Image: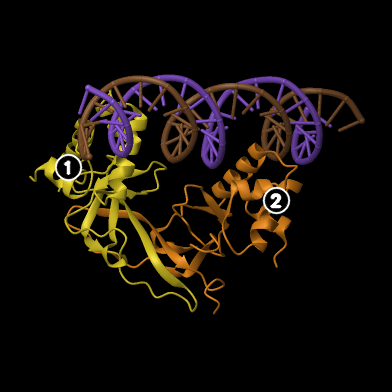
Chain colours: A yellow, B orange, C purple, D brown
Amino acid sequence: MIQADKFMEEKGVRPTAMRLLVFRFLAESKAAKTLSDIENTFAKADRTTLYRTLKTFEDKAIVHQIDDGTGMTKYALCEEGCNCELEQDLHLHFHCNNCKETVCLTEHKIPYINLPDGYVAEDANLVLKGICDKCSGQ
Amino acid sequence: MIQADKFMEEKGVRPTAMRLLVFRFLAESKAAKTLSDIENTFAKADRTTLYRTLKTFEDKAIVHQIDDGTGMTKYALCEEGCNCELEQDLHLHFHCNNCKETVCLTEHKIPYINLPDGYVAEDANLVLKGICDKCSGQ
DNA sequence: CAATAAATGCACTTCTGTTGCATGGTTCCA
DNA sequence: TGGAACCATGCAACAGAAGTGCATTTATTG
């Protein structure tokens, strides 16, 4: 486990108490979390603060947003060397219909798609839905 | 162009004036439309009616929903023989970052993805983002 | 220590999606 | 044909998430 406060300073984010809590919470949870998830975990914290904390993290490439189709934006820590903005780093996400959790499948990149003439792809989002390893009992 | 009212009756939907308008609007527009789009097009119509019209269409497999990551649900007519609920019919969607329109690439199916052990895919959503054929000037 | 900048907390707004309920129009059968 | 039952429509209101403005507290720096 890396030193959270040092890591954040390297990324150009002041490691306040609240930010460290949010960072550690995301680091310990394998699945992506919504703003509400975090809000419920730290009941004393204000939603706006958490909202802006996540936004700051996103700007500094500490977390990335995930749109898994549930209608709620989720956040997950960027893996080491994750370049969310680069097309070659577009990993896919898996949403479990059973436990409702969404995880990054960092090793699984989105395959190249052959588009019709005139279409230029710059970005992609692929969400697979089904049963995750925990819920399939394997 | 098919007979809209006959088509709707075959699908088990009463072809009211409003429904025909919405159907024709979707049929004439190549891109997927949001509820707000339709609301603005038919200013006299009530939002709830349009909402339920789209829901009815969806239930009867006349339209399918698209989540292109813009945060607003979009709707597009199902192609002939489109079985939105079946995995083998999962076509992908393209969202243009320039004109902001989203289109179905019906011919382009989502490729098979090799998942880690224990993961079982039941559904998938793939949205490519970039520049569409109209905007790339080709 | 003072001045400045950043982070936090509260209130409020906006937007999309959604539901309840009353009303108006169709269909269908006695 | 009359009316009961059903369906579609319209109005109002609500819920949840996202986002903004502003005042206050906390941290940083000269």
Q: Secondary structure at mark 2?
A: helix
Q: CA distance from mark 1 to mark 2?
A: 47 Å
Residue type at tag 2: Thr
Q: Nearer the viewer, residue C12 or B131?
A: C12
Quadrant position of the N terminus of chain B in the picture: bottom right
Residue drawn at 72 percent across, 48 percent down: B42
Q: Nearer the viewer, residue A80 or B46?
A: A80
Q: Residue B76: which quarter of the image?
A: bottom right
Quadrant position of the C terminus of chain B in the picture: bottom right
**Quick one: label 1, few (<14), some, or many (20+) residues within 10 Å?**
some
Left or right of B22 on screen, residue A46: left
Residue type at tag 1: Ala
Residue drawn at 60 percent across, 64 percent down: B30
Q: Mark yes or no: residue B110 visible.
A: yes
In the figure, D30 relative to D1: above or below? below
**Residue B68: % across, % down:** 46, 55
**Residue A117: % across, % down:** 48, 79
Residue drawn at 25 percent across, 28 percent down: A41
Which chain is disc 2 placed on? Answer: B
| Residue at image mark 2 | B41
**Residue B126: % across, % down:** 39, 60
Which chain is disc 1 placed on? Answer: A
**Residue A136: % across, % down:** 21, 46
In the figure, C4 relative to B61: above or below? above
| Residue at image mark 1 | A27
